Amino acid sequence: MTDLLTLTNVHTHIGRYHILHGVDFAIPEHQTTMLLGRNGAGKTTTLRTIMGLWAASSGQITLAGQRIEAMATPDIARLGIGYVPESMAVFSDLTVKENLVLAARDGPLDDNRLEWIFGFFPALKRFWLSRAGGLSGGQKQMLSIARAIVEPRKLLLIDEPTKGLAPAIIGALIECFAEIKRSGVTILLVEQNFHVAQRIGDAVLVMDNGRIVHRGAMAALAEDTLLQERLLGLSLEAHQ
Amino acid sequence: MTELVALDPLPKPKRDILPLLLPLILAVVMLPLIGSPSSWMTLTVASLAMGMMIFIMASGLTLVFGLMDVLNFGHGAFISVGAYVATLVLLPLATWVQADSLLTNLAVLAPAAILAMGVSGALGLIVERVLILPVYGQHLKQILMTTGGLIVAEQALYALWGPQIIPLPLPTSLRGSFIFGDIAIAKYRLLAMLVGLAVFLAIQITLNRSKIGLLIRAGVENREMVEALGYRIRRLFLGVFMVGSALAGLGGTMWALYREQVHASMGNELTVMIFIVIIIGGLGSIGGCFIGALLVAMVANYGGFLVPKLALVSNILLMVVILMWRPRGLYAVTNR
Amino acid sequence: MMILSGDRPRSRILSVLLLVIVVALAVTPFVFPGAKAMNVATKICIFAALVASYDLLLGYTGTVSFAHTMFFGIGSYAVAIALYAIGPSWGAVAAGLAIGLPLAALLALGIGLFSLRVEAIFFAMITLAVASAFLVLASQLSWLTGGEDGRSFTLPELLRPGTVFIPKNVLGTAITGRTLTYYIVLVGSAAMILGLLRVVNSPFGRVLQAIRENRFRAEALGFRTVFHLTYANCLAAVVAASAGALNALWLRYTGPDTTLSFAIMLDILLMVVIGGMGTIYGAVVGAAVFILAENYLQSLMGAASTAAADAGLPLLPGLLHPDRWLLWLGLLFIASVYFFPTGIVGRLREMARPQAEG
């Protein structure tokens, strides 16, 4: 199994603050890797650094054999990365359709692919011509994910998709992620909710204080409650 | 998954039409105050024409700010440059300008306007690369650099053309007025209104119907996400900046013809008015900029007629009133 | 050394430079008693104080105001109008100050409360709009301000050039009311600058810098940023108005061109950037360098322009004409913002600082 994305000793500073202290990991192709950790551990910063939204101050980031740490965000995205930020960042002034038209960089919307997406998220079809700003939180999340997969992408970076959503919608998202993975996409998913993580993750990375403190199979971590306790502490209790 | 389909239909977003009605309300309220319908009509047409010209000059500035958080304090330079460049065509071809034929007049006006837009747009390219790019994201330096640019441009115009005022007579067929009963409507004002309306519609259609327009609207809201979708927003920004500069050049040409004179300080003087317009409209909002321009022009014209002394500070008063009502302008752009 | 506050020049060259400037200004009436030299020296004093007060805003809070000349003008006009209307008495000067300074503070308060809540860029735009409206008002309300012509007035007896205290002494200079006025300007300006130095090094000044660095963080730490910014704005306005009052006393005249014009606003911006933002000392250095250059380099430009014209060169005579002084200043300004954002003082301090610290 080859690795699609590799981070080697990545450091990131935001202003005067040193956030990532040498992040090392590799994401195997066609798998879903969960990135877990406490609030402030550096998970979002890691995703943003991969996207080039924060510049890595040192270290290497490699996507499919190509160094990307010095590239500009648009060029990184064009290598085939779909990004779903924590804030969802749907364009609220634009309609659902316009949001997806923009996301389809390489041409007009593909009807078959749209139907595939509507299969997970019927609400998007229903509100096709409505302003995205009027959508509910869950619908915005669906739109944000739909934007990332409206064209085939190699890698998806998804930041806390289930935060604040109702259980029914979380269920829909989990099914969606499984289906995306089956279509051959590699996923790196930041998640706070351990139950969600153990249902969709193949591999797991745990971060703390800007470093990776654990890497392994999701199933192994799911079985080892002591290890969970040590790595993730009380923060997970709240979600359980 | 079925429950997702069963959601209530989205409430229609409430359209905020009160600002749209403001110019209308103002015009109606002024009618009894002014008394004579013919004076009112003349003033209203004058306001619309002036407002459209201001809108043309201000639109680029507000879009550039909305898209990239860049405020060009030297925007006025493009206005003056446009006006001066137009004289390069209009003065040597004075015989065409004097000819009493609309076609001949337009045959010289059109290239003058196009050249003005071209030179201002090209200057926009230089300004963006030299003055704005190096200090991108630093407001303080941006203000200082572009203010410096304004000084240099104004002084360069003085050095090239001299400090004197250049008279720029209106083409013959655009002089005078159309008379309807006792209402006179100046021909040039009508033309200015038409051009302004055309520019406004062109901007609206671009913003709402084209992918470039979608990108601009998306970029105004969340620049980072547009980049994360794989679009090089800096190029888009440069394009918008150049178009905005070109429009300022067009507006400068029109304003110079309106005043029938050209002077290097005109950009400087108009800058203040343009700032007030885009503040009133809400920084970054094209629709707000349009209404703001109309309001400023109406207050100037009606105010100048009713209370001439007040006209000196009418813009400031208007701004204060609007900002008391809506501290971020008529249409506050989301996410800033 | 209480009056000097803890903030030293922190560079030997800078200390020497400041000392030279201060000593030169102090002895000007005796060493360079000519009218031009006296005018230049006075302008340096007044602008050093004016620019220092602007630095409080620009350098220490990071807000750009285009209304500083308005406050300068308010002080200047208040004294001028009082002396014009009441007649040449000390009471009139006092009345001018008593009206002008609070008026400046009040206006600054209004602008601050109105526009400092929102973005910094708003403040810059609104101050520009207000200042231009004020300029229009000052040049139109002729019954009060004298319109474009401004107001000339007579000074109290003690300050008049005709009042001779000591006739020609050994150095060949007479001590007159003019000399006294000069020293009032010098001492007044020095007091304002030293006062500002104390302010920026007080806890209040540190809060301002915290706000400049990161407004949200300062707010999160519990500082009422709008209050602090508005307070700084008022303080700067009062100092600017005081400098304006001194300016009026020296010129015995106040008009739009000497106090309110956009050109003076640009001069202030240039002086603060060239001298070094956020240092206060930079205001002194910037004002001295700029005003000396303005007065003595312009004639050089004139000579160069004539020479270029004689040599038949195209374009150059126009570009080098002394009236195009601002063109070169503008270029210099852009270059300094870009290449020397810390100005002369910042540069000197960087040179003085040991390498290890960087």
Image (tube, rainbow, N blue to C red):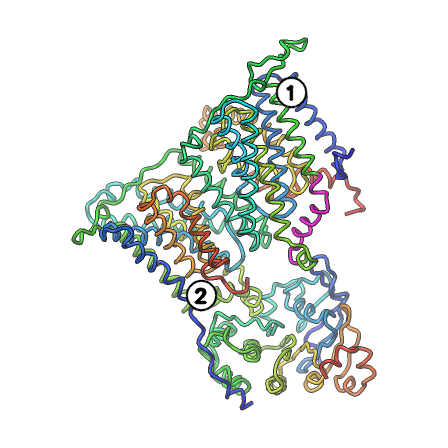
Label 1 belongs to which residue? C28
| Amino acid under disc 2 | Gly
3D distance between C-alphas at marks 1 and 2: 64 Å
Span of residues in magenta: C198-216
Q: Using the image, determine if residue B95 lies above or below residue C227.
A: above
Figure quadrant of residue A7? bottom right
Looking at the image, which is closer to me, C323 or C188? C188
Report if the CB atoms under discs 1 and 2 are less than 8 Å apart.
no
Looking at the image, which is closer to me, A39 or A222? A39
Q: Chain of mark 1?
A: C
Label 2 belongs to which residue? B213
Q: Quadrant of the N terminus of chain C?
A: top right
Residue A145 appears left or right of C357: left
| Amino acid under disc 1 | Thr
- Please give the name of the residue rendered at 52% of the width and 27% of the height, measured from the top-left corner: C301
Tell me the number on the disc at residue B64.
none
Residue C194's x, y, as percent? Answer: 69, 34
Q: Using the image, determine if residue C313 lies above or below residue C353.
A: above
Q: Chain of mark 2?
A: B
Q: Nearer the viewer, mark 1 or mark 2?
A: 1
Going by the picture, which residue comes out furthest to the bottom?
A: B2
